[in-house]
Image (cartoon, rainbow, N blue to C red):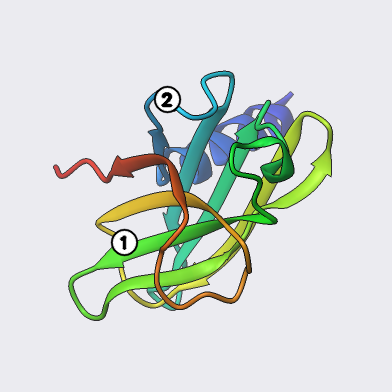
């Protein structure tokens, strides 16, 4: 019983240190349910996980695109391409990444190429970090 109680407390403590951001409903893909989880690791880096459920394939947009790109905005170096959402299955797209800079905003665009250095495609949704 003690082991179970300790495990539950540890899980609570580990998950309570993370910030979870819910993205607003997208005008482009209104069925998408997008969240970001941000947690600081032991090296003071930011572990960021983006989960986009029910996000239509980028090829189905008008005009069609090839991929979804996640962008971080931070005060140290502006807007950065942080990677592409990986389609895990028909219902779930994810991106797990680490940044040494704290993101102030996160947004997702549909792009023709995943390696673009500046957002030029259709903006899907944008969320700002809550400040305490």
Position of residue 21 in the picture relative to residue 115 (left or right): left
The image shows residue 104 at horizontal and vertical percentages of 24, 57
Q: Quadrant of the N terminus?
A: top right
The image shows residue 55 at horizontal and vertical percentages of 65, 32
Q: Quadrant of the C terminus?
A: top left
Q: Secondary structure at mark 2?
A: loop
State which quadrant residue 99 falls in.
Answer: bottom left
Q: Nearer the viewer, residue 113 or 34?
A: 113
The image shows residue 88 at horizontal and vertical percentages of 82, 44
Q: Label 2, on which residue?
A: 27
The relative height of residue 56 versus residue 17 in the rendered view (above or below) is above
Identity of the residue furthest to the front in this view: 63
Q: Earlier in the sequence, mark 2 or mark 1?
A: 2
Q: Which label is found at residue 103?
A: 1
Q: Nearer the viewer, residue 93 or 43?
A: 93
- Count of picture labels: 2
Q: Residues within 10 Å of mark 2 (few under 14, many from 20)?
A: few
Q: Residue at x 37, y 62 (%)?
A: 72
Q: Nearer the viewer, mark 2 or mark 1?
A: 2
Q: Residue at x 48, y 29 (%)?
A: 28
The relative height of residue 6 versus residue 86 in the rendered view (above or below) is above
The relative height of residue 127 versus residue 27 in the rendered view (above or below) is below
Q: Which label is found at residue 2?
A: none
Q: Secondary structure at mark 1?
A: loop
């Amino acid at each position: 019983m003690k082991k179970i109680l300790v495990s539950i407390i540890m899980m609570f403590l580990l998950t309570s240190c993370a910030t979870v951001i819910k993205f607003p409903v997208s005008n482009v893909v209104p069925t998408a349910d997008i969240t970001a989880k941000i947690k600081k690791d032991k090296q003071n880096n930011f572990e960021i996980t983006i989960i986009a459920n029910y996000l239509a394939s980028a090829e189905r947009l008008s005009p069609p695109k090839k991929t979804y790109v996640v962008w971080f905005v931070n005060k140290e170096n502006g807007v950065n391409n942080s990677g592409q959402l990986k389609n895990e299955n028909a219902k779930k797209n994810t991106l797990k990444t680490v940044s040494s800079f704290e993101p102030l905003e996160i947004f997702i665009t549909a792009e023709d190429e995943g390696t673009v250095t500046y957002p030029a495609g259709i903006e899907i949704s944008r969320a700002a970090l809550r400040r305490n």
